[in-house]
């Protein structure tokens, strides 16, 4: 037995020896004898588990977290293999499985915090590779990726960012990296935004996230050219691009230009693949469609003849379409639109007249110029007044006076005039150096500038005034009657008769100056204005009374009336302060009316007790005498007012529109505008058609 006692002692002492140094190391560590503790744990402690556990505790105390983490991991993996005696020894040093896990976790956390203070790429990569027990590993990965992406971006090269994406395809910063890569690829490839560079970029980087933006820029560069062939090329190259439709529309606008039927038809033939053929067909229809302004909610829009709203009400004023363009107003400024409600002239002018041909008079700040249908200023806006005389002749007023120009502002005649007014037949009465002459529509002189006044009788005959007296002048450049009379009036061209005033008397003369008959009339301005032959009868006066005389000088009706009107089929006369009508020398309608007013075409307006009616030249009542007022308009209609409401009758007295409107405007002989508060309607007499906006 004794010979084996040493074996027993050895076996019993083994764990004791293994643990004795470990216990010493724990004591030294507790006393902060760190150097001795390290030597004890690392060199003297024989049990590998206790050594790793002791070193873990030591490294953690010394804030050597990387080493503490490794040692604690090693110890933890061996925990389950240890005897109860060894585990109890470890517990004496306050080391158990929970403490080891705590050292592991805290070491990783503290090491990560230190790393964040002074991050390096290598440090972050190594941490993630070795500290796999770190509980916030996602945070560590994000920190690594953020730092590495920053380094890649700082190099300002697409290759660096591309390498990051390739190395870390699952990174949280993958999207951000992709955006940066897009920018770097774009900047490296597109040193200048030209069509060539952009197209090369699209070819080299078809998956770049800036492709759509590049396509827009590319389209913009093509569009800036405003060239049909360039846009055709763009459409051909990029048929599936999102901007190709916009390119088609711009191509259409450029091709069609001022939008007329001929060009639209030609475009459809040249571009059969145009994706908006329905709109093109509608444009053709719209060109030939008459549009009418209408009022709704105090705003103007446009409708067609069926009342369908074509342009929504959005304007404070709206004119009719002329030559495909309409003048509109918003916020006290004017512009012009086409029938698609596109501005051909922006809303910016204080004054804008209708387009008679391809141009219109435009004004700002009391100055005027001429503008084209495309908005280009043809004549600068710096004239005091501009008037259009005919399609090619305008008169401009500046500080010197009036001169003749064409629509492009080219001077047509050097002369400067004090005044210019239009005469029938296209003639122009012009005042120059305080004397009046006449020009024809080609601006050729037909009457010399030597008269004080000129009054047109017909296209070839003029009453002229010189040195205060009147004469008769023909277009052949000679006087028919010299300027020797105080007043002169042509009363019968066919019989070459004139009426002249000389002193206190009126004479009837022939063009050659001889008297037509021998006696004279007492002068009065009233008689001079009335005297005119109709069917050889004329009104004359004597001692303030009026009668009738024939062309031979015979008195047909003695002067017994208080007043008379001009000769006609019916001749107004006044007796006992009331008016009646004569047919030649016989009474046709008795004197019982308060007023008798001649109108065009032989119509006469009669008024009685505040009511008015109309008779024709034959004395037939066509509008009964029951209206408050009646107005004749030259288009051939009577506007009738009754109790504040207006209606319309035509020339034969037929009531076209009953008295139910506040405003009536005759726009043409076949178009009438009628308005009430916030309502506009049109009436086309020839079709008995009413047009009003449909609220659909």
Image (tube, rainbow, N blue to C red):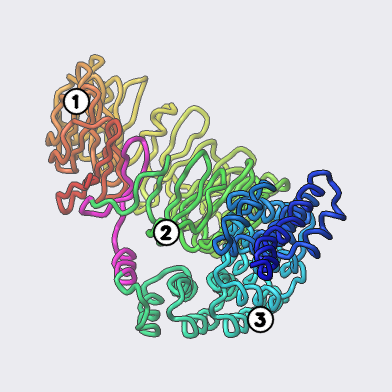
Which residue shows up at 70% across the image and 73% down it?
A: 187
Task: Pinpoint residue 655: horizontal percent, then vertical percent.
Answer: 14, 38
Q: CA distance from mark 2 to mark 3?
A: 38 Å
Q: Which residue is mark 1?
A: 627
Q: Nearer the viewer, mark 1 or mark 2?
A: 2
Residues rendered magenta in the picture: 279-307
Q: Is residue 370 visible?
A: yes
Task: Pinpoint residue 24: horizontal percent, then vertical percent.
Answer: 78, 52
Task: Rate crowding at label 3 as few (under 14), some (14 to 19) or many (20 or more) other CA atoms within 10 Å.
Answer: some
Q: Quadrant of the N terminus?
A: bottom right
Horizontal relation, residue 485 to residue 10: left or right = left
Q: Which residue is mark 3?
A: 197
Horizontal relation, residue 575 to residue 395: left or right = left
Q: Secondary structure at mark 3?
A: helix
Q: How many marks?
A: 3
Of residue 200 and residue 468, the one placed in the foreground of this image is 200
Q: CA distance from mark 1 to mark 3?
A: 80 Å
Determine which quarter of the picture holds residue 297: top left
Of residue 538 and residue 594, the one placed in the foreground of this image is 594
Q: Secondary structure at mark 2?
A: loop
Mark with earlier residue (1, 2): 2
Mark with earlier residue (2, 3): 3
Which residue shows up at 14% across the image and 23% down it?
A: 590
Q: Nearer the viewer, mark 2 or mark 3?
A: 3
In the rendering, which numbered label is found on residue 338?
Answer: 2
Q: CA distance from mark 1 to mark 2?
A: 42 Å
């Amino acid at each position: 037995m004794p010979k084996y006692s040493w074996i027993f002692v050895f076996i019993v002492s083994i764990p004791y020896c293994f643990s004795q140094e470990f216990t010493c190391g724990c004591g030294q560590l507790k006393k902060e004898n760190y150097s001795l503790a390290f030597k004890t744990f690392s060199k003297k402690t024989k049990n590998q588990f206790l050594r790793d556990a002791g070193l873990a505790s030591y490294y953690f105390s010394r804030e050597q977290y990387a080493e503490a983490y490794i040692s604690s991991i090693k110890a933890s993996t061996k925990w389950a293999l240890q005897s109860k005696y060894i585990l109890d020894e470890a517990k004496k040093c306050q080391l158990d499985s929970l403490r080891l896990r705590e050292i592991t976790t805290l070491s990783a956390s503290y090491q990560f915090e230190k790393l964040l203070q002074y991050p390096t790429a290598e440090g972050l990569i190594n941490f993630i590779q070795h500290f796999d027990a770190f509980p916030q590993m996602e945070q560590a990965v994000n920190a690594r990726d953020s730092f590495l992406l920053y380094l890649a971006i700082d190099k300002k090269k697409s290759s660096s960012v591309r390498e990051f994406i390739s190395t870390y395809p699952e990174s949280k910063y993958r999207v951000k990296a992709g955006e940066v890569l897009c920018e770097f690829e774009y900047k490296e490839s597109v040193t200048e935004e030209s069509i060539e560079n952009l197209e090369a970029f699209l070819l080299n980087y078809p998956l770049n996230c800036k492709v759509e933006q590049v396509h827009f820029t590319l389209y913009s560069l093509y569009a800036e050219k405003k060239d049909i062939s360039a846009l055709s090329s763009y459409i051909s190259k990029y048929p599936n691009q999102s901007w190709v439709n916009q390119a088609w529309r711009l191509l259409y606008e450029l091709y069609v230009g001022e939008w007329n039927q001929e060009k639209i038809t030609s475009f459809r033939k040249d571009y059969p693949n145009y994706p908006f053929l329905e709109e093109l067909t509608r444009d053709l229809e719209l060109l030939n469609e008459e549009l009418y302004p209408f009022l709704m909610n105090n705003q103007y829009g446009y409708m067609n003849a069926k009342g369908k709203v074509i342009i929504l009400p959005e304007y404070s004023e709206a004119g009719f379409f002329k030559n495909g363009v309409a003048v509109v107003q918003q916020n006290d400024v004017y512009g012009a639109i086409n029938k698609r409600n596109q501005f051909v002239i922006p809303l910016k002018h204080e004054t804008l007249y209708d387009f008679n041909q391809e141009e219109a008079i435009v004004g700002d700040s009391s100055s005027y110029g001429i503008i084209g249908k495309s908005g280009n200023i043809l004549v600068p806006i710096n004239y005091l007044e501009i008037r259009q005389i005919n399609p090619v002749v305008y008169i401009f007023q500046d500080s010197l006076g009036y001169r003749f120009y064409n629509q492009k502002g080219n001077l047509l005649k050097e002369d400067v005039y004090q005044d210019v007014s239009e005469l029938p037949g296209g003639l122009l009465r012009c005042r120059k150096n305080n004397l009046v002459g006449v020009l024809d529509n080609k601006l050729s002189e037909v009457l010399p500038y030597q008269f004080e006044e000129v009054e047109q009788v017909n296209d070839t005959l003029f009453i002229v005034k010189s040195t205060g007296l009147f004469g008769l002048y023909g277009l052949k450049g000679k006087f028919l009657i010299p300027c020797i009379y105080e007043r002169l009036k042509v009363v019968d061209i066919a019989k070459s008769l004139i009426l002249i005033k000389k002193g206190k008397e009126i004479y009837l003369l022939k063009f050659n100056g001889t008297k037509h008959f021998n006696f004279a009339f007492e002068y009065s301005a009233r008689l001079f204005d009335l005297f005119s032959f109709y069917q050889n009868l004329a009104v004359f006066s004597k001692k303030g009374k009026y009668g009738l005389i024939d062309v031979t000088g015979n008195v047909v009706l003695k002067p017994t009336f208080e007043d008379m009107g001009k000769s006609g089929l019916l001749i107004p006369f006044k007796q006992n302060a009331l008016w009646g009508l004569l047919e030649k020398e016989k009474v046709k309608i008795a004197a019982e009316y308060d007023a008798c007013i001649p109108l065009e075409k032989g119509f006469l307006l009669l008024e009685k007790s505040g009511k008015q009616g109309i008779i024709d030249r034959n004395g037939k009542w066509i509008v009964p005498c029951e209206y408050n007022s009646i107005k004749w308009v030259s288009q051939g209609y009577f506007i009738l007012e009754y109790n504040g409401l207006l209606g319309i009758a035509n020339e034969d007295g037929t009531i076209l529109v009953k008295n139910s409107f506040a405003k009536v405007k005759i726009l043409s002989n076949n178009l009438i505008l009628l308005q009430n508060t916030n309502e506009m309607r049109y009436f086309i007499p020839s079709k008995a058609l009413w047009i009003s906006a449909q609220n659909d």
